[in-house]
Image (tube, rainbow, N blue to C red):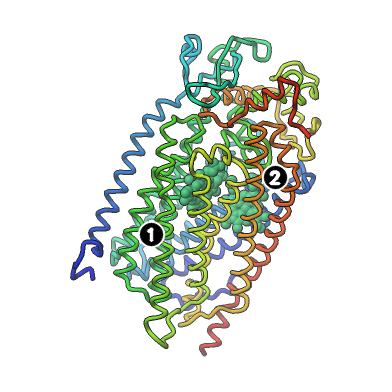
Amino acid sequence: MLTSIKTNHLTSSGQKLGMMYFRVAMVLFGAQLLMGLIAAIQFLYPGFLFELFDFSVARMVHINALVVWMLYAMIGSVYYMLSEETEHAGVAMGLGKLAFWVLTLAVTVVVLVYIFIQIGPGKESTIWLINEGREYLEAPRWADIGIVVVVLTFYWNVFATYMAGKKTGIMTVMVANLMALAGLYLAGMFFTDNISMDQYWWWWVIHLWVEATWEVFVGTLAAYALIKIIGARREVVEMWLWIEVLMLFGSGILGLGHHYFWIGTPEYWWEIGALFSALEPVPLIAMFVHVLYDWGKEQGGSGARETVKNNPAMAWLVTNAFGNFLGAGIWGFFHTLPQVNIYTHGTQFTAAHGHLAFFGAYATILVGMMYVGLQGAYGVKEMKSTFNSKMAIFLITFGVVGMTVALTIAGYEQVLVERAELGGGWNAFFTAQDLPWYIQAQLWRTIMGVVTLVGFVYLVIDLLTIGKKAQQAEA
Amino acid sequence: MAQENLSVWTSIPFWRRSAAWVTGFATILLIWLTFDTMGQISMGTDADLQQRVTKRVPAATVINYHIEYKMSEKRGHEVPVIGKKEPFFGKEWSPKEAAALLHLGKLTSQAKNCMNCHTLLGNGAYFAPDLTKAWLDPAWQKGGALQPMTGKSTVEEAMSEFLMHPSQYPTHARMMPDLKITADEAKGLVAFLKHMSSIDTNGFPRNFSKTVDQFKTGGTNAH
Ligand code: HEM
Ligand code: HEM
Ligand SMILES: [Fe+2]
């Protein structure tokens, strides 16, 4: 089935490799949603798969599949744009292909171990072989080392090709940012008995990924996609990109402080974290304005000329502009001041933000890149949205926004009852979990999760068929 | 536009240079703050505990002391207060033994994946109660709901019994699964939890003592 996505119109081996990464990304995305649904059902029916496939296992696979499919789609996107930006066929692509298979094999083994072995005894060997038990970074140490080796190979492909080819502003940002992104992973690769120290470095990986390097990555992809899809002018796009880098790193790096309010770290992080993370929405507004402004300009300026060359990709890109701003900017700002965060920290409110932010900022643009890839793979000049494309984007977005609203209500109830009224603790927690508002919210989250899954099915069907349809339309 | 350079505001080199400076400055400030924080959150020593030197993260031997969470007028929120010595599993642990026990406990917490149901210091999953101050939770103290359920008479014994056979002691329809935790691992986990409760978390969870006060005056939050 997967091979039905044709790549025979692509001449560059980097672009073919990019398409391979996209395929695995979609498989993992599907796994992510199924695991999320299992975990959501367990909130409502705690007996579901109890002591067989517990919440902790479902959730671990849910968030790991999330991170890994996004990394796959990110690597795929870079391989895809590499030869076009550098105007160079690519250095050592054979090695890159080997790395792809090694990584995919390793991911398969890790997931099978998560699912079938799940946990181990309290020994070093568990951390090396089964799972590391640190949210998002559960991958056992052997896999960590494997990931580093594969990522170095990938980086060599990108860096050597960049050095050998044309050096556009977009690729300069990409090469520098990828180095930071890969390097940060090392901060999560050690064990300590000190839980405060543990979480201090854990956040270096998590926060400095999603609120600094991944955001810059998205800015770079958006720049590339705007040029490609609507023919935006490179000078304008690249200038915006540098401004975005300035604002994203300027606020996001020290915004890290918003995770250091309560983990044993000193009080000065209250001020630093509040100040800089409160500025984090600013670049997201800028990115939003940038995408919509360019879109409007290219649409309006040229009269009858059809300017959007890839409708589904553009639709996902615009959803990205909205989603990044809402999920990260607005939902992030809601709980980023310490005065608020002391009550919301570790409630369903955090989960509401996590869902809308990861979806809005990353899932959207990466799906958009897959459509860009398909357009190249089938060699079509114009890619029009099909019924399936529309159903996919509508249902997935509606589902995730619905889940976010439901979780926000659940979180609000927890903040008021568990935290403000009862002051936390075992009884306070379960009292709040049992109130009807909370249970109804969990029910709606599950229903909206099913809507998301249906949308995903449309998306897969669309990705597998849209290219052929577009080809036939042009023939 | 860039070639004509009518204004610095539309000049790519200007923005590129500014981006580099701002990023560099933020990175250096973060590294500097990290050095300061490392000093403040590295674990204290047994001597600190004996001399009553307050550390944000005390030594593992804090398991030999009574711990309370009390309102500090000066700081405006609750802080952990380390009190008199008390036996932990019926004995006093030497610095070496305590460190080994804490190590086993932290390792077990990762090996059993606690963080994908619970939160630790408020981070993790939201399926089960926060464990930051679980050691101090009134539900585990004498007269609380959880201690008599296990038939034990100290907090540490009650907690370790629960951890070994959680689904035998259901407190709620949502139960903790049996994670094949051995007796030694359970002891280690309780040491890990007791140690965590002694960390200065700037007042998180806020008003935790409200539950304690209610409990002490005979009230309970359940049902
Ligand atoms: C695309 C960007 C972002 C993504 C993907 C993202 C994702 C997440 C996730 C998954 C968590 C929960 C981590 C955990 O499991 O413990 C989290 C926590 C948090 N995020 Fe974001 N975030 C983004 C941007 C932002 C921004 C821009 C802000 C602030 C303006 C922000 C503020 C926060 C805060 C304060 C927390 C801590 C919540 C707590 O105390 O429980 N985030 N974020
Ligand atoms: C079928 C749809 C989905 C369902 C039913 C679902 C369900 C869940 C559940 C039950 C959790 C555990 C929350 C907890 O610990 O209480 C979770 C966590 C999470 N999910 Fe989903 N999910 C779905 C889709 C997604 C999507 C599309 C994304 C992002 C693109 C996502 C990102 C996350 C993240 C980042 C977390 C960790 C949140 C945190 O720690 O704050 N999920 N999800
Ligand atoms: Fe953050």
Identified by mark 2, the residue type is Phe
Residue drawn at x 23%, y 63% is: B11
Residue A460 lies left or right of residue B42; in this view the side is right
Camera-nearest residue between B101 and A100: B101
Residue A454: % across, % down: 68, 66
Identified by mark 1, the residue type is Asn
Residue A236: % across, % down: 31, 69
Spatial CA distance of label 1 from label 2 is 39 Å
Which quadrant of the structure image shows residue A390?
bottom right
> Can residue A346 be seen by looking at this rendering?
yes
CA neighbours of label 2 inside 10 A, class few (<14), some (14 to 19), many (20+): many
Mark 2: secondary structure = helix
Q: Does A242 appear above or below A381?
A: above
Residue A275 lies left or right of residue A361; in this view the side is left
Residue drawn at x 46%, y 44% is: A205
User: What chain letter is assigned to the residue under label 1?
Assistant: A
Residue drawn at x 39%, y 54% is: A178
CA neighbours of label 1 inside 10 A, class few (<14), some (14 to 19), many (20+): many
> Can residue A147 be seen by looking at this rendering?
no
Mark 1: secondary structure = helix
Q: Earlier in the sequence, mark 1 or mark 2?
A: 2
Identify residue for label 2: A55
Q: What residue occupies the far bottom of the structure in this picture?
A: A475
Mark 2 residue CB less than 8 A from any atom of ligand 2: yes
Residue B52: % across, % down: 49, 11
Residue A76: % across, % down: 47, 63
Camera-nearest residue between B147 and B203: B203
Identify residue for label 1: A157
Quadrant of the drawing holding the N terminus of chain A: bottom right
Q: Does B147 appear above or below A102?
A: above
User: What chain letter is assigned to the residue under label 2?
Assistant: A
Q: Can you tell which of label 1 and label 2 is closer to the viewer?
A: 2
